[in-house]
Amino acid sequence: MDMMYFCLVPKLWNDTIDAHRHAVREAVLDATAALVSEHGPTSVTMSQIAQETGIGRATLYKYFPDVEAILAAWHERQVREHLRQLELIRDQAGSAERRLEAVLESYALMSRGHEATALATLVHRSEHVTDARHQLAGFLQTLIAEGAAAGELRDDVPPQELAAYCLHALAAADSLRSKAATRRLVKVVLTGLHPPT
Amino acid sequence: MDMMYFCLVPKLWNDTIDAHRHAVREAVLDATAALVSEHGPTSVTMSQIAQETGIGRATLYKYFPDVEAILAAWHERQVREHLRQLELIRDQAGSAERRLEAVLESYALMSRGHEATALATLVHRSEHVTDARHQLAGFLQTLIAEGAAAGELRDDVPPQELAAYCLHALAAADSLRSKAATRRLVKVVLTGLHPPT
């Protein structure tokens, strides 16, 4: 490469490298997700991932030290994407109660995804999951406070406690076999947010 | 010891040995519980436990291989006792709804015990805890079905799903600082069991 050229457009060149690295990383995560969903998370190897991504094993090791690190990065991406989806749902039009219902239902359906369960044993309670749960609890709390102020939801219990109640109760979705059962669970959780009769 | 005597009353003698072993075992569990609540579960040693119980270390090792085994046995005893207490509460007089409320409140208050949380990291999801949760879920399910039949509780969701909802939602008690907050949580969970308005 011409050194002169390199010096004139360093920013563009760096951007290109960054974009390339990002693309490789994303491709690795996608390939790993595909392998995991086909073979299960414990039987996937670095060689398979390299082959599936179409890069050399040596290159793959420059990006990730082992399969576990790839799974953790993939899981982090999933959690981030889920949170973004939930934020979009939250920001739709409608009453606080309707938006809360939509958020809770989407969250419950995401939680019962089979990858989520299979990976939970590998990824444990990692930091990004804890962060995401805090963010989610925070925005549920805001929605619940809005609903309480509008007279739609109960105001005899602090919104923070009600948000924790929602997240814990919805964890029951893990053991539910059908989407219909998950929707029933969301209705029950929402009923709990209403003023007692 | 006179062999003749031994042969004439073997059952009585065996009962005596069993009772003695049981008493030593219970004393070890009590001493360990006291040490754990004073120093935390990770800093307790076999020597301390032997000293506190008033038996020799060699004797202690005949009962338990290590501190972890003692903690597991102690935790199992706690869980069994809690379950028995909940059954007593369940079998009191009153409507299904009132008894359910009493059971849920006791369970929630037990769950937030500081030993429970400190030990959870050591004892993990052991088999006896899973068994106890199944038993508890089973008897909540029966109470909920009774309440639904009496028209006190909702009948649009299977009692099994409602029992799972209760147990998961009450896990939020872990993060609550006060008994008052725990009681609020129980009220919210119960509201969820009522027919939707």
Image (spheres, coloured by chain):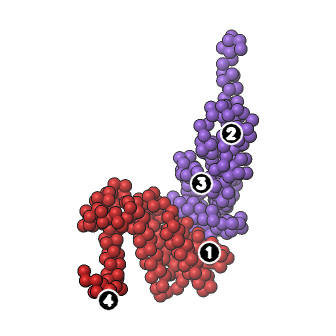
Chain colours: A purple, B red
Chain letter, disc 3 residue:
A
The alpha-carbon separation of the residues under discs 3 and 2 comes to 23 Å
Tell me the element at label 2.
helix
Query: Residue at label 3?
Result: A120
Q: Residue at x 66, y 19 (%)?
A: A10
Local packing at callout 4 (Cα closer than 10 Å; few below 14, some 14-19, many 20+) is few
Query: Residue at label 1?
Result: B160
Q: Residue at x 39, y 67 (%)?
A: B74
Question: Dots 3 and 4: beta carbons under 8 Å?
Answer: no
Query: Residue at label 4?
Result: B8
Are the residues under marks 1 and 4 on the same chain?
A: yes
Question: Picture quarter containing residue A56?
Answer: top right
Q: Which mark is residue A47?
A: 2
The alpha-carbon separation of the residues under discs 1 and 4 comes to 54 Å
Q: Where's the C terminus of chain B, which quadrant?
A: bottom right
Tell me the element at label 3.
helix
Q: As shown in the figure, which amino acid type bears the numbered disc 3?
A: Ala
